[in-house]
Image (cartoon, rainbow, N blue to C red):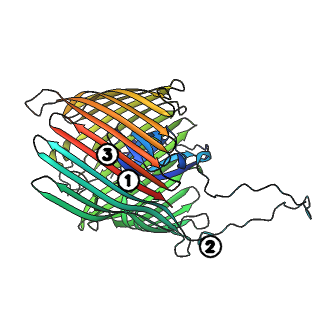
Amino acid sequence: MKLPYVAVTCALSVTSAVAQTQEVRVECKVTQVTSGSIYIDAGRDQGLMAGDRVVFLDANGVTSEGLVRSTSKASARVELLPGSPSVERNARAEVRIPAERAPKTDGLPPHPGWTQPQEGWAADKPLLAPVTGLKPGERESVWTGRLWSRFDTDLSTSTDAGDSTYNYFAVGGDASLRNPFGQGGSLRIDAEAIAKLRDTGADNESESYLSIDRLYYEFGGTREEPTRWQMGRFYSGVMPQLGVLDGVEYSHRSGSDVAGASLGWLPEPTSERDSFVDLAANVFWKHEFDEQRRSTLGLALQQTLHDGTKDRSLILADGETRIGEDLTLRGSLWIDLYDGDDDLKDSSWELSELRLSALYRRSVDDGMGLSYARILWPQLLRNEYAPVSNDLVQDGELNRVSAWAWQQWNTTWRTDERLDSWSDQDDSGVSWEFETSAQDWVWDAGRVALALTYADGSYSSGPGVRVSADKQYDEVYASVGWTWSQYEEKDWTDDDNPFAQHMLHGSVDWSLSEAWDLSLRADRRFDDVVDVWSFGAMLSTRF
């Protein structure tokens, strides 16, 4: 079988060898998703600043990109880049920051100056005796992580469906135990106990379950031990784009190359994470062009079985590079391989997904970006996507080109622009947004912003306005916003009259102490048909 060599070459040619300023990776997760904003559980204490790039990864391995727009002590507000897939709460996120911004974790005071004379020192001998660090298996077992308790409620009034109430309760944690068995490994758990209650007036529904996002033990993968093992529920340590796996992974590093394989089940992309239906076997390889891992190229092959029946045969490639200090290029592609059992696909292979992006950031103050995405619907037995028709699997496609830019004109004024063009098998459209914001203009340590938008979607289109404001009060970060959108339905009802929708949003992030944080939010969305109030609270502690 001849592979699409040209497509592979184009997507992977974005990778080159560049050695630049050292960076560190800050791993975090999504705590809240609102209209136009995503909140992550990392902020100024972890070294984040406005303008930092965030990469999100869901359980199926689909990546999205965003930029940090504002930070509080322990959280940050992120806006997705145009064309990026939507992100759900609890999705994994990663931010790369310069090493000099990373918080110091040793907790040791500076060493005082030497007061004793240097005795017995000779010019041909080292001043200090050699220092031998502790091996991973000799280190103390220590728990680190975060615990939280969360409550959300929605109160809905609808002229069509009547009144309803939805309540969501969750208690969870994300913690790591270093060296639990004296072998230098680590144990990681990320889980929530969840209860949902829904009251529609005519019917009451409730459910409770334990959602385990990650639970695994890993060892190796260090300078002393280049072989690494992962066991449990985890993202691949080499190719996380393969998604969450219930199984085992082996990888081995040789110089700048890492290769390995994994075997296990793919949990369903639901809150319950049901598993043991879809078996996946993966092999992968990754090359790192520089010590800071800022330029990488990865390749993976995956074969899945659904209830014992052959399902997806996938080739996955992913590359990224930083050119100088200004330009970041990324590319990824997914190629599905088909045979005679796949009656909805004519060809023996298909480029199911292609994503290319370029981000030019001259500084935190100025930058621009460009992205392209092409997505087709693969034929699968696995319940990975929302139900789609056979026609969509055969002929459906989505193409999207997006461009965006931002400029910090002075210490006060900033502008942001976005243009998004899309097309599918039936329609096409163009959306845009222009925002101007002012920092420390109305009040100190605060920001106000005004945005004009136009959205052209598959079912409706129309203009919009968004007004927002935020302010930092010592250990309290508060934000409010109002959004107005007017939509005109497109070709799917007889009523072409436009309708307006309003949304009000307010949130407070309060750092109660060095370890404890409290977040409160309130939203209201209303139009001629629906009026929804939403409230939420989250209390968390780090240890």
User: Earlier along the polypeptide chain: callout 2 or callout 1?
Assistant: 2
Which one is in front in this view, the residue at disc 2 or the one at disc 3? 2
- Who is closer to the viewer here, 73 or 356? 73
Q: Position of residue 16 (x, y in %)?
A: 53, 43
Q: Determine whether the residue tagged by mark 1 lies in a helix, strand or loop.
A: strand
- The reply to whether residue 66 is visible in this rendering is no
Residue at the disc numbered 1: 538
Query: Looking at numbered disc 2 in the image, what kind of residue is underneath it?
Result: Glu
Instruction: Give the number of callouts.
Output: 3
| Residue depicted at 28% across the width and 68% down the height | 276
Q: Position of residue 218 (x, y in %)?
A: 48, 68
Query: Looking at numbered disc 3 in the image, what kind of residue is underneath it?
Result: Leu
Neighbour tally class for label 3: few under 14, some 14-19, many 20 plus, Cα within 10 Å: many
- Who is closer to the viewer here, 339 or 393? 393
Q: Position of residue 330 (x, y in %)?
A: 45, 42
| Residue depicted at 44% across the width and 51% down the height | 41
Residue at the disc numbered 2: 138
In the rendered structure, are the residues bearing label 1 and label 3 in contact, judged by CB atoms less than 8 Å apart? no
